[in-house]
Amino acid sequence: MKYSATVVALAVSLVLIQPAAAYAVYVSGSAPIEFQVMPAMGTINATLAEILTTETQIGTAIVQASDKQVSAVTEAARAQRESDILGRQTERLERARDSFTVTDSICSESASGMATQVSKQTRSSASRLSGGGGVSSEMVRKSVASLPVAPRQGGYRSAAVHAAYCTAEEAATYGGTDLCPQVSPLPGGDIELRSLMDGAGAVGKAPDLTFNQEQVDAAMAYMKNSSRHDAGRTPGKGDIQSATGREYQGLLTQYKSIQSAASQPQLDMIAASQPNPATRDALGESLQSPSASQYFSATASQEAQKSGVMSEREYESFEVGRRYANTAYETDLQAMSGDNLTRELVRIQSLGNWLQLGIKNELRKANVIAGQQLAMAAKAQYAPQLQQLSNQMSAGVTANAN
């Protein structure tokens, strides 16, 4: 083997030294190639094949992972697009619902929409009551509607009217007489302020903001006793032709104008306490809300529950109270759309409305008392003059008019 390798090396050196020339070479075999090189080449090829297989698998895995990522991104984009479409559809539906449907909990639209009609009806009723219209009791109506009479005659009338409103204390003193036949179902109805504020009735009864006819009559009797005092009689046709009669009539006219101002707050209060037909439709609309219907059943006056019609006073109280003083409305708030801040603002606004209603009621009461004070001051001013002139007319001491 060593000898053969030396011969091969010598031959290669001679070839390199000699000028380039083409010689035909015939190799019949080589042990190193067959036994060393070729096995190594086979091992290398096997290793390369394994590397290729591994790289192919890695590439396939990468491609598959990329496909999954693309699918995930595509699915996320599709889901986002569908969510956006659904959101826009929901928004359009909400706008349509707000614009064209009535919500379960109706707010102030019904009250504000009917306010003008209710107010007009109340003012019209007040003007009728001033002349005795809408009063069922003949004694009360005659006392309210008649022309001014002498203080003595007015006292007789007041006593006769009071017989229908006799109290238990009066019955114990002079019960059984024509001035107090028996204890009245509306004791003190013509002499107590609660006849205006809460409606006449038994002591300790619940307040009524919508009066029945008997309560209206009692309130009118109270108005007559407290703000329309009889300071002087109406002169006859013969009396008024004289200069003294004309002077008397002038003073009486002035006194009547002050009486009108004194009694108007009470007339407004009574008119606002009468059943008002203009509230029927608005009340029916409000009662579509379950919470409002529940509050109505719990708080409405007997007259309102029986007829489905409220007074202006009770309807105002109902519209405010069913929001602020109604726990069922708080449940409604939790079911409504909007955040807690909006709900809290609604509650605060409702509380403000409730307090404003209380202030309004207090102002009404103050106006009634101020009117009574005005009436008493007018009587103190005009009664002595009217009485003096009345005595002169009765004695025939008159001055001729020029």
Image (tube, rainbow, N blue to C red):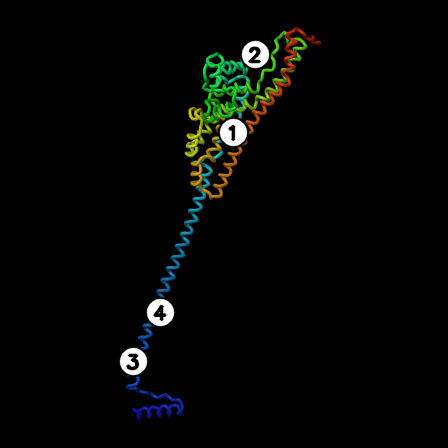
User: Which residue is disc 1 drawn over?
Assistant: 115
Reading the chain from its start, which is encountered first: label 4 or label 3?
A: 3
In the picture, the disc for residue 55 is: 4
Reading the chain from its start, which is encountered first: label 2 or label 1?
A: 1
Residue 129: x and y in percent read 53, 19
Marks 1/4 in contact by CB < 8 Å: the verdict is no
Quadrant of the frame with the C terminus: top right
Residue 108: x and y in percent read 49, 34
Q: How crowded is mark 1: few (under 14 residues within 10 Å), some or many (20 or more)?
A: some
Q: Alpha-carbon distance for marks 2 and 3?
A: 150 Å
Q: Nearer the viewer, residue 162 or 14?
A: 162
User: Is residue 361 shown left or right of residue 252?
Assistant: left
Reading the chain from its start, which is encountered first: label 2 or label 3?
A: 3
Q: Nearer the viewer, mark 4 or mark 2?
A: 2
Is residue 192 visible to us here? yes
Is residue 165 visible to us here? no
Marks 3/1 in contact by CB < 8 Å: the verdict is no
User: Which residue is disc 2 drawn over?
Assistant: 153
Which quadrant of the figure has residue 230? Answer: top right
Residue 202: x and y in percent read 45, 22
The amino acid type, in three-letter code, at marker 3 is Pro
Q: Which of marks 3 and 1 is in front?
A: 1
User: Is residue 27 shown left or right of residue 377?
Assistant: left
Residue at the spot x=43%, y=47% of the render?
A: 85
Reading the chain from its start, which is encountered first: label 1 or label 4?
A: 4
Marks 4/2 in contact by CB < 8 Å: the verdict is no
In the picture, the disc for residue 39 is: 3
Q: Which of 227 and 210 is in front in this view?
A: 227
Does dot 4 land on a helix, a strand or a loop?
helix
Q: Alpha-carbon distance for marks 1 and 4?
A: 86 Å
Reading the chain from its start, which is encountered first: label 3 or label 1?
A: 3
